Image (cartoon, rainbow, N blue to C red):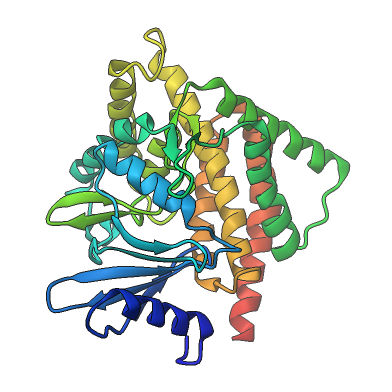
Amino acid sequence: MTLSDPRFLSLNQWLNGYFSDEVTPVLISGDASFRRYFRITTPDATFIAADSPPQLVPIAPFIALSNAYAAAGLTVPKVIHADAAQGFMLMSDLGDVQLLSVLNVQNVADYYRQALDLLPQVASVVASQHFVSGLVEPLPLYDEAFVRRELHIFTEWLLGTHLNLSLDESELQMLSDSFDLLVDNALSQPSVGMHRDFHSRNLMLQAGKLCVIDFQDAVVGPVTYDAVSLLRDCYIRWPQPLVADLMQYHYQQALALGFIPALTNLEQYQTWFDLMGLQRHIKAVGIFARLNYRDSKPAYMADIPLTLTYIVDIAMQYPELVSFAHWLTRRVLPAFAASQSLSEVKQ
């Protein structure tokens, strides 16, 4: 960003039309999209301004979900002022402390239970009111087409663009069979309101309270999705016994609240949970590669090895997916390691 950046200049002008005294937005971050965030400091308070190019990332879904999540009792950024045509928002400031930054083996169980306790409120949000038209619109469905579209990100961006792998007919069939299993698993679960990116980087700590951000892509989908997103985080891995205990905590919560049928046993729930996490991790490694090549955000490539490890470890536990795990170990992991070595040599 430079002072000649036309969007920054427009944002600065827009903000100074709102505040009585002149303010200077200071860049604090971008995210895994085309949005940028700035902090504004006034004598009385600090605020966050978002620059979200309207042709790429419209702000209407964010504002609608912000209002819906707040109404459900979640602490989220409050939109104070917005301009949909320009893609600018002024919001309350939830601070800089991501949950990830404070987690350790001693406190993670407590913090993650607090986070899981937010999921019933997330689950209750299945529609939102458009902030311009006022129409109440149901959230998109995480349906078969949606799931397959996400899985294709892995095939296109990791296998194709990054690794340039050519697959023979048997490999293509194996991938197709594996993806069919994951699609069936997603569609077999009860559906609830789903944040879709519920993890330790999208939970902020403010005065000891968890706040929720980055919810604009919320959908209605599988009951285990947000729980496995949190517990098998792409950015950090916890000991399996801890994850198992917290998974059971969510299972009991879902049973008690009627989100899953009363006769659902833990084994069924764990299968839903494991395979849902597998689908999410397959999508995630594709997105990390896409962020590098399409969006010039190479830092996410560092998160691929852990995520691939999750995929192999979980796939090995299911007989129908063992061939997928072996193929990843034989072809994808060595190819990815070689690509990283080549990248380091070029640097």
* Percent coordinates x, y for residue 85 in the rendering: 52, 64
Q: Is residue 297 left or right of residue 28?
A: right
Residue 215 in view (yes/no): no
Q: Is residue 60 left or right of residue 318?
A: left
Of residues 31 and 269, the one nearer the viewer is 31
* Percent coordinates x, y for residue 5 in the rendering: 51, 86
Q: Quadrant of residue 159?
A: bottom right
Of residues 138 and 152, the one nearer the viewer is 138
How many numbered circles are shown?
Answer: 0
Residue 184 in view (yes/no): yes
Q: Is residue 60 above or below residue 239?
A: below
Of residues 241 and 157, the one nearer the viewer is 157
Quadrant of the frame with the C terminus:
bottom right
The residue positioned 33% from the left and 38% from the top of the image is 243
The residue positioned 61% from the left and 31% from the top of the image is 143
* Percent coordinates x, y for residue 121 in the rendering: 30, 33
Q: Is residue 149 left or right of residue 222?
A: right
Q: Residue furthest right?
A: 169
Q: Is residue 230 left or right of residue 308?
A: left
* Percent coordinates x, y for residue 315 in the rendering: 57, 36
The residue positioned 59% from the left and 46% from the top of the image is 282
Q: Is residue 233 above or below residue 146?
A: below
Q: Quadrant of residue 127?
A: top left
Q: Residue furthest top?
A: 263
Q: Quadrant of residue 31?
A: bottom left
The residue positioned 67% from the left and 58% from the top of the image is 158
Of residues 207 and 104, the one nearer the viewer is 207
